[in-house]
C-alpha cells in the first residue's frame, strides 16, 4: 500500500496583470509576487512578464500550494509541469497539473534548534 501524502495548505497563487505596490521580483522566473506574507489566508498575487518561461497554465490559472515533507515523493507518478527547483534559500518547489489546474508542492528546510 502506498504511503498517503500529507498535505498542509500553504497559499493560493492568483495570476494578475496589475502591478501592486510592494511586490517582489524573481528575476530568474521573470515574475512579481505579492501578498503571501501579509495575508492571513495565504493569498499571493502573481504577475508575469511577457517572456516568463513558466508554463501558460501557471500564468493564467490560479494554483493552490501545499507544504510537503518531500517534493520528489509528492510529484512521483504525476504530470510534472515545473521540475523541482529552489526559488529561495531553504525551499524546493515543483508544480504538477491535476484535473486541468496547477498544483504547487513546497518543501521547506527544517532547521534544528539547540534548546536544552
Image (cartoon, rainbow, N blue to C red):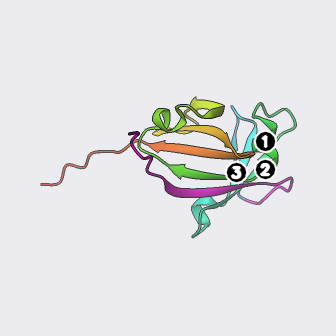
In this rendering, the answer to whether 86 lies above or below 101 is above
The reply to whether dot 1 and dot 2 touch (C-beta < 8 Å) is yes
Local packing at callout 3 (Cα closer than 10 Å; few below 14, some 14-19, many 20+) is many
Mark 1 or mark 3: which is in front? 1
Our reading of the magenta stretch's main secondary structure is: loop
Which residue is disc 2 drawn over?
61
Q: Which mark is residue 57?
A: 1
Q: Secondary structure at mark 3?
A: strand
In this rendering, the answer to whether 40 lies above or below 70 is below
Q: Is residue 88 magenta?
A: no
The reply to whether dot 2 and dot 3 touch (C-beta < 8 Å) is no
Q: Residue 109, image x and y in percent?
A: 40, 41
- Quarter of the figure with the C terminus: bottom left
Between 56 and 32, the one nearer to me in the picture: 56
Mark 2 or mark 3: which is in front? 2
Which residue is disc 3 drawn over?
33
Local packing at callout 2 (Cα closer than 10 Å; few below 14, some 14-19, many 20+) is some
Q: Which mark is residue 46?
A: none
Which callout, 1 or 3, points at the residue further toward the start of the chain? 3
State which region is magenta: 1-21
Please indicate whether residue 1 sits to the left or right of residue 114 in the image. Answer: right
Amino acid at each position: 500500500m502506498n504511503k498517503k501524502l500529507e498535505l498542509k495548505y500553504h497559499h493560493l497563487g492568483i495570476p494578475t496583470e496589475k502591478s501592486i505596490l510592494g511586490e517582489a521580483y524573481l528575476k530568474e522566473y521573470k515574475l512579481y509576487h505579492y501578498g503571501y506574507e501579509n495575508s492571513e489566508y495565504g493569498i499571493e498575487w502573481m504577475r508575469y512578464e511577457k517572456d516568463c518561461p513558466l508554463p501558460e497554465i501557471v500564468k493564467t490559472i490560479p494554483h493552490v500550494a501545499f507544504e510537503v515533507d518531500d517534493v520528489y515523493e509528492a510529484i512521483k507518478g504525476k504530470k510534472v509541469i515545473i521540475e523541482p527547483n529552489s526559488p529561495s534559500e531553504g525551499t524546493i518547489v515543483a508544480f504538477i497539473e491535476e484535473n486541468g489546474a496547477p498544483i504547487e508542492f513546497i518543501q521547506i528546510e527544517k532547521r534544528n534548534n539547540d534548546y536544552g
